[in-house]
Structures are given as C-alpha cells and as structure tokens.
Image (cartoon, grey):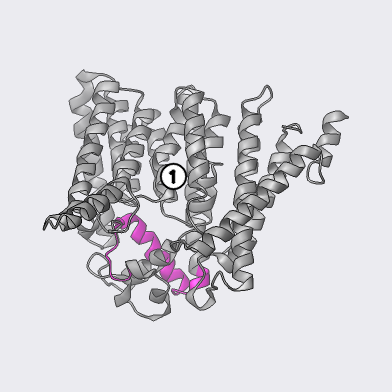
Amino acid sequence: MGFSVDLRRCQLLGLAGSAVLAAGGETAGALPVRELMTPSSGRGALGLVGVYFGVVLLIAAWALLGRLINGPRPPAPRALLVVLGLWAAPLLLAPPLFSRDVYSYLAQGAMVDAQVDVYTHGPAVLGGPLADEVAPVWQNTAAPYGPVFLSVASALSHVTSAELPAGLIGMRLVALAGVALMAAALLRLARHSSVDPAAALWLGALNPLVLLHLVAGAHNDALMLGLLGAGLVAARGRRPLLGAVLVTLAALVKAPAALGLLAVIAMRARGRRGLPKAVLTTSGAALATTVAATAVAGTGYGWLGALDTPVSPHNWSLTSVLGRATGALLSEAGSDLAPLAIPLWHGAGLVATAAVVLFIWIRLRPAPVYALGLSLAAVAVLGPAIRPWYALWGLFLIAAAAPSSSVRHRVAAVSGVLALAVLPSGSPPDAEQLALATSGGVLALVVLWQAHQAGHGPLFARAERERTA
C-alpha cells in the first residue's frame, strides 16, 4: 500500500463506511412498505449507490485491519472490541438492511402473543400493518424457529405493543446481545484452541457479514450463534451439562445449532470409553431443556414439521440450482419427472450433508470446535436453502479454531464476496439496481485508490503525522 496501516485509520475508514451505508439505507433499505422508494427515484438511486459505497469502504477497512493483525504489532483484543462497537454504532438506528426477515420475526412474535399457532398459519392471518410488512413469499408460511426465539419475539411484541419502530429497535438489540455473546465466546474458544484471539475476533466478529446481516439485518442467527458459543465455552470449561443446556437453547432458536451437541459430547467423552456416558447425559440434558423451554413458551412442537419453511423453488442454493437445471432438461425432453427434480436434488443434498458431517467427525476427527465449524459450513453449502448470513454458522467457529492462517484467509475472501451479494432492500435485483450498486462500489474503489496514491489524504493525515513524528 502507499500508506502505512494503523488502527486509527482502520477505525475511521470502517466508521465512515458503516455511516455512509446506514445513511443510504434511509432511502434504499428494507423500509416499511409505506416508505419504500423505487431505484428510479432520485433519492432511492442515491441511497443504493451510497449503501454499496459504504459496504466497499467497510470491507476495505476490515481487510486493512486484518493486515495489521498479521503484522509485527497487532492490536489487543480489547482494542478490537472498541472497533466493533464503533463500526456497529451507525447501524443501530438505521432501517433494516439486506433483508425483510425482521418484519417476519415481529409478526410471528405478535401471533404468539395473540395465541395464534405460528406453526400452522403464516403472518397473513394476523392481518393489519405489521403483517403487511412481511415479504410476500413468507406471508402464508409457518415459522421455522424454535420456542426460545418465539418466546423472545412474543415478549418483545408485548412490551412494544406490536408497534413497528420500537419492535425494530428491540429486535436489533436482541441481535446485538447475540453478537456480544459471540465476541466473548470467540476470545475464550480461541485461547482454548491455541488460536490468536485477535485473529479470531477479526474473522468471527468484525467480519462485514456480522455487521451487515446480524447487526443491520437483525437476524436471529446472532442469538443462535451467541448461545452456541456460550455453550461450547461452558462445555470446554468442564461444565458439560450447562454446555448442553445452552447449545440446546441455541437449537431452539434455529435448528442447525443442534449439531453443537456433537461437540459437547466429544468434549465430555475425552476418549471412546467415556462416549456412552457422554451421549446419555448430553442427550438427557438436551431433552429436558427442550421439554422445559417448549412448556414455558407454550408453542408446542410444530416447529419440527416447519423446518422446510426457508426452502423455496427460487432459492439460490447449490441443490436448488441443480434441481432447476435438471427440471428444465427433463421438461425439454417431455418427461413427467420434471416436477420431482428439485425435491430429489434437495434430498440428495441432505444425504450429502450427512455424509460430510460423518466424514468430518469419524474420519478426519479434528478438534471438536473446528469439526463443528466445518459441519455447519457443510450444512449451509449443501442444504436446500442458503442466504449470505448462513455462512456465519460455520465461519464463527472456524474463526475460533482454524488450525492455520491460510484457512482463515480463504474464509475471509469468501466473506468479502458474500458481503456484496444482497441488495439493501432485500429484494431480487434487476438490471437498474445492479448498475447502481456497481457504480457505488466502483466509486468507493476510486476513492480508495486516490487515497492509496496520495499516501496521506484528509482521512489519513493525522495517522501519517503520528507515524512520522
């Protein structure tokens, strides 16, 4: 680079990026339907350009910070937590970004509060302004979330009287609490795994995907991962029963966290002779936690039958793409089997996921936390539904326990690409939106290049003076 890297510069660049994208989200985000703007409107177009300008600045700041962490004088973990707070701050009061899922959460919470079965009915049955905010594809679909998350959403609905602005802030605070748990768990798990805690925080908490989708998007994956991380810390610290309880609570937010029980069992068994006892005690704790949480929530076990809710024929998962391609070929051939192509590929993906997970745990047998990270990555890649934030399931634990920096570098590269994969409105892109988003990103690259050439632009002047003093 034409200028040196220091922590203050990274802080300022990332803060500028998150502030610009938050400002752009005011006109281009996943706004309430009465406030939605089309990209053809001047403000909507400017907002979309601004969001992608900010995203590219944020990615650049994160990349520079990674270079600093790998340098001779890496920042302390406490300093990185301050950076995380600074970068997240502008996003806390921004409108929802990159997805409309938070509206579904609020509608489902209001349904539970009104004693409507969310595992039988979709938000459309709720009616009213809150249900109108839910994306059309999910209006008549059951909730795939467990009783722990629905209890949180119901309590939030009750406290806020189902009012939209307060509910959005509340759901974002829930996500922020999950991110805080993730950061705390990363530090502990990294030390247990002999991984640099600063490197783990950089990849697992300061990652643009965390800021864009867990903070700005307020996804409940933050709560799931926070509880999962806390459970693994407890199990690693010789409190396996507490670990099993916390991991089960995470699975009762979103089901993929249930794989964490494999890690708890592996930590408790400490060899094949202790495996039967570990399986029995962990399974017993998980079952008791599930029964108790479901009884408290009063939602029943319908979520087990609703786990395929995130799956839609238009999903861009690997198996969905292969299914659509196969179906098109069968249709061209005049075969009656074309409608079966997508379900068959989804089934093949689930079988492949199970095979990969078994291979990881039985043949590769890496450390439990790393094995769990690889397993959750396989679930995200081979599963029937995929979203950019699903990558965080495995990434979070890979960051904490990856045995080499090369693994972290590859995962970081994938993260940078995925951070650009979704429009701030959460809607499917069209040519005009793609052109505006691309122009925003290119404009940010031009600005960064000019700073690179100058070596000490206005943003970097103070850092350069301090370096040369």
308, above or below 68, in the image:
below
Highlighted magenta segment, given as a residue range:
138-166
Answer left or right for 459 relative to 89: right
Give, as a three-letter code, the residue at label 1.
Gly
| Image x and y of residue 214, in percent | 48, 52
172, above or below 319, in the image:
below
Residue in view at x 86 percent, y 29 percent: 468
Say which quarter of the image contains residue 336. bottom left
Residue closest to the far front: 333
Which is more toward the observer, 240 or 229?
A: 229
70, above or below 424, in the image:
above
441, above or below 228, in the image:
below
Q: Is 163 contained in the magenta span? A: yes
| Image x and y of residue 91, in percent | 59, 57
Question: Dominant secondary structure of the magenta stretch?
Answer: helix
Say which quarter of the image contains residue 153. bottom left
Q: Secondary structure at mark 1?
A: helix
On-image quarter of the N terminus: top right
**Total residue callouts:** 1
Residue in view at x 68 percent, y 21 percent: 72
| Image x and y of residue 187, in percent | 52, 33
On-image quarter of the C terminus: top right
How packed mark 1 is, by other alpha carbons closer than 10 Å (few <14, some 14-19, many 20 or more), is many
Answer left or right for 449 relative to 362: right
Which is more toward the observer, 192 or 469?
A: 469
Residue annotated with mark 1 = 226
Which is more toward the observer, 372 or 407?
A: 407
Residue closest to the far right: 469
Q: Is 93 contained in the magenta span? A: no
Residue closest to the far left: 336
